[in-house]
Image: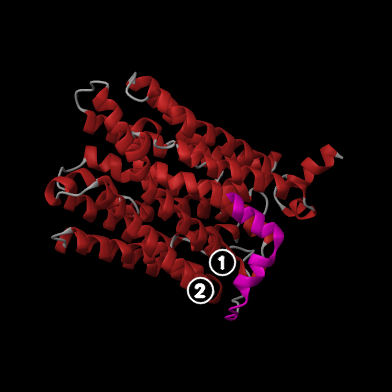
Amino acid sequence: MTARNRTLYLLSFAELLAMGLWFSASAVSPALSLEWDLSDSGKAWLTMSVQIGFVVGTFFSAFFNLSDVLNARHLFVVSALLGALFNGAIGLFAQGVDSVLTLRFCTGVCLAGVYPPGMKIMATWFREGRGMAIGMLVGALTLGSASPHLLKVAGSPDWRELMYTASLASVLAAVICLAFVKDGPYQASAARFDWRAVGRAVADRGVRLANFGYLGHQWELYAVWTWVPVFLFYSFRDSGVADAAGGSALAAFAVIGVGGIGCVAAGILADRYGRTTITIISLVVSGACCLLVGFLYGGSPLLLLAFCLLWGFVIVADSAQFSASITELAEPAYLGTALTMQTCVGFLLTMGSIRLIPVFADWIGWPWVFAPLAVGPVLGALSMYRLRQLPEAARIGGERRNQEIVA
């Protein structure tokens, strides 16, 4: 096996293990609700506290160019270990929601040193096939995000033990990255701190439009990932499923986890046919799913699951391609800064959409709760269509070939 492929598999596996920290508390929100009498707003804050921590962490990481000034592998290792520590402390010490939210915030800060640096490390190994490589990394992240829902069903009913399991997985991720992952041949020299690097990235119109596309995608993605387990539970319960809680947990794992396959498939297609083409298709289909899923609420559980599996496949399929586009459009010396800035702004937006879902549920009911999210994919698709028209698009994987065909 080549060093490049070995890094592809090992780094993706490490990302899968570490990102289980993200939804570990959200996956056990029903147990926490019973123990601490959480409202829907309290459940939302279990995920939003991580988002806030991640945004704070990525903001400081981007401003101080941490992924470019420091070695990205070392940043990944330290962050995964600290994230495991804070997440494990929830199981050891948490006696109420306030302490959980504080520790979840700290976990989110640490994850800012796992996800963007992971993408930068992968980019140092791939020029050709970069969409596939980052797609596999984000696919692993997707499976990692889904894994707590599976562990909740397959493992111990004690929610504290799930916290410990997720933390141990993150420790293993750090060990894998430290011992077996190396810097690639396209690794740029360590950059000096330059607070203007973020401004230069924002000023670049190609980077800016790719970021706008990413924002449209993020408006939908994490709101759906956070609330689709609850949506499925209510729908299964209303349709008479005997074990609605267990069935919805397994279904949520499948719906989120199938996106991992979508990420890899979209990466392969984007390398061949162009990132703007694949992101536009994915955004349009997932936006349509937001509008249509309500028609299946409370009906056949199998039909609803089949539809949501399609949705789960496309909703995250485009995610890696926005990041891959940034790696091809941004200033090479500050690639980590540009990626971190992208995720910072994107996850800042997710806090709004996650928090609005309970509001939408009160206004229009659970069947149609996801319909307002469709505006994000629409605006994101328009941004990527605009990027497709620019000369800068020729620097993005697959786009030069598309432009030659059109000409």
Q: Are marks 1 and 2 in contact (CB under 8 Å)?
A: yes
Q: Residues within 10 Å of mark 2 (few under 14, many from 20)?
A: many
Q: Position of residue 356 (x, y in %)?
A: 39, 48
The x, y position of residue 219, in whole percent, is 49, 48
Q: Quadrant of residue 46?
A: bottom left
Name the one closer to the observer, 210 or 339.
210
Amino acid type assigned to the residue bearing label 1 in the image: Gly
In the image, is residue 207 part of the stretch drawn in magenta?
A: yes
Residue 129 x %, y %? 64, 48
Camera-side residue: 293 or 279? Answer: 293
Looking at the rendered structure, the kind of residue marked 2 is Leu
Give the labeled residue for mark 2.
Answer: 66
Label of residue 405 in the image = none
Q: Is residue 212 left or right of residue 241?
A: right
Residue 23 highlighted magenta (yes or no): no
Q: Which residues are magenta?
A: 192-213
Q: The residue tagged with tag 1: helix, strand or loop? A: helix
Residue neighbourhood size for the residue with mark 1, other residues' Cα within 10 Å, grouped as few (<14), some (14–19), many (≥20) = many
* Residue 96 appears left or right of 42: left
Residue at x 56% of width, y 56% of height: 3
Q: For the view shown, which residue lies furthest in the right direction?
A: 407
**Which residue is pictured at 39% across the width and 23% down the height?**
296
Determine if residue 113 is in view: no
Q: Quadrant of residue 267?
A: top right
Q: Which mark is residue 336?
A: 1
Q: 404 or 374, which is in the foreground?
A: 374
Q: Main secondary structure of the magenta part?
A: helix
